[in-house]
Amino acid sequence: FGAGCQKQAGDAPAPKKSKDGHDHEHAHPEEGPHGGPLAEWGEHDFHAEFTVDHKSKMVLVYVLDGEAKKAPKFDATKITKVTLTISNVSPPLTLELKHDASKTGSRGIAFATTHDQFAKDTDYKGTISGIIDGLQYSGEFKAGGHGHEKKKTGHDVETHPGGVHVAFAQGRY
C-alpha cells in the first residue's frame, strides 16, 4: 500500500465498484505527480503529496484528486487549515501551510511552509491535515528514498526492533 493508505495489517483488500459498476482492486499510487509520497484523505476522496526542497528549507504539499494524478476540480479557497505534523523529530513539529498560487497548477493545489528542519536531507514521517469545503481530512505519509532506509550497520530499520526511532535518536539519520 502507498504511504498514507490506512489499511490494517491482515485486512484483505476489498473490491471497489467503479463508476461503470464493475468490481476491481483499487490501485494505490506510490507517489504523486511531483514525485512525493502521498497521504490519503478520506476513502480516496483526495490525496496530499509531500515534497521538500532542502536548499530553500521549503515544504510544498499538493492537494490532489482521488486518483492522485492532478488538481481537484474546484477553487483553492475551498481548502483551509492545511497543517503538516512531522512525527519522527523530537519534539514533533506542527506547521500551518499557506496556499501558494505560483506553484498551483493542473498537477495540484500547492500549500507551502519553510522551517530549518527541512534543510536536513533525512526521512520524514507524519500527518497532513486540511479542511475541504467544511470537511476535515487527515492522512499519514512517509518520505524516504534518500538512501536512509538502512542504518549504517546494514540492518533494515523497518524490521529491526526500535528501527527508525532508535536510529533517529542515535543521530544515524
Image (spheres, rainbow, N blue to C red):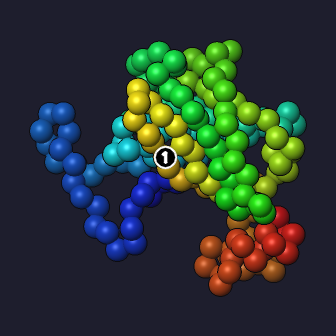
Position above or below: 29 against 104: below
- Name the residue rendered at 72%, 37% in the picture: 59
Q: Please say whether residue 173 is visible from this viewpoint.
A: yes
- Name the residue rendered at 39%, 68% in the picture: 8
Position above or below: 24 against 155: above
Label 1 belongs to which residue?
A: 138
On the image, the x and y values in percent for residue 93 come to: 73, 52
- Name the residue rendered at 54%, 53% in the picture: 140
On the image, the x and y values in percent for residue 66 come to: 39, 36
Report the side of 6 relative to 83 (left or right). Answer: left
Report the side of 162 relative to 121 (left or right). Answer: left
- Name the residue rendered at 57%, 33% in the picture: 81
On the image, the x and y values in percent for residue 171 come to: 87, 69
Q: Secondary structure at mark 1?
A: strand
Quadrant where the C terminus sits is bottom right
Report the side of 105 relative to 165 (left or right). Answer: left
